[in-house]
Image (cartoon, rainbow, N blue to C red):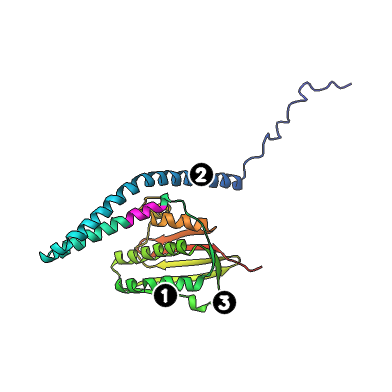
Amino acid sequence: MEQPNANTNELHPLVPLHDPPTVEHNHLIHQLESLAYENQSLSNVRTLVAGVAHEIKNPLTIMKGFIQLIKPDLDKLQKSDIADLLLAEVQRTTNLVEEFLQLARPTKHTTERIDLIPFLEDILLLFQSEAKLSKCELTANLQKFKLPIEVMINPGQLKQVFLNVMKNSIEAIRMTNRKNGHISLSVRQQFHFVTINIRDNGNGMDSSTQASVFNPFYTTKEKGTGLGLFLTKQIIQNHNGTVKVKSSPSLGTTISIQLPLLHSS
């Protein structure tokens, strides 16, 4: 009679203890790690900003009032340009502080049903004069849409997104000193999403800049805050959308914003 193997409890050497991690598994872990890092970064930024911005805003208000008080005296001395310059700088700094405070304030994500086409037409109208001054042509494909493209958004927050992107495009073209600047806005529907592409022929970005452009406080501008595109990404993600950048140095940049469509039941 055959004797039982003393090692019957041992696993066969060819049977693995665990299935090896798949590519999808590794990708999911990487996404979770990135999300955790972004959430922690956002929390740290908000804590820092909240402690600094309020301390700056009150002195700015006092300075602005004082300059406005002495402005008539400076006008009499034909020094009104000094007052105007100081007021402009105080206002610029105030706007900067307000941008910082947007990070610190908890935002109420209230949405409403809107037609995206007239919403974008209003955005383009806001930039017509600035684009003309920068020798930049604005074009769009919005006229081809005969039916509404409905989305659930917070209009104020989405307006901020497109103002940030359009402003960046105009500034990128201005830096090239082009006389034939061009910004195109195009809308494309696909399945359950709508994609808005904003493309410019400005100075563009290298791969390193593209990888960092949505990080807080990252900027290549001399007077930039590095918060515009960071806030843009946060807002779009809060709307269950995505934002991507594709760029080439000296050739221009395309910002692609994808939002879920609202479908009637």
Instruction: Give the residue pinned by disc 2.
Output: 36
Q: Quadrant of residue 204?
A: bottom left
- From the image, give the main secondary structure of the stretch colored magenta: helix
Give percent across and percent down for residue 265. 66, 68
- Tag 1 secondary structure: strand
Q: Nearer the viewer, mark 2 or mark 3?
A: 3
Residue 100 in magenta? yes
The vertical placement of 56 against 70, above or below, is above
Q: Nearer the viewer, residue 44 or 30?
A: 44
Identify the residue shown where x is 47% and y is 67%.
Answer: 197
Which tag, 2 or 1, sits closer to the chain's start?
Answer: 2
Q: Is residue 74 left or right of residue 208?
A: left
Instruction: Give the CA separation, mark 2 to mark 1.
Output: 39 Å
Q: Are marks 3 and 1 in contact (CB under 8 Å)?
A: no
Give percent across and percent down for residue 144. 51, 78
Magenta region: 95-102
Give the residue type that dot 2 points to.
Ala
Instruction: Give the residue pinned by disc 1.
Output: 139
* Numbered circle sitting on residue 147: 3
- Tag 2 secondary structure: helix
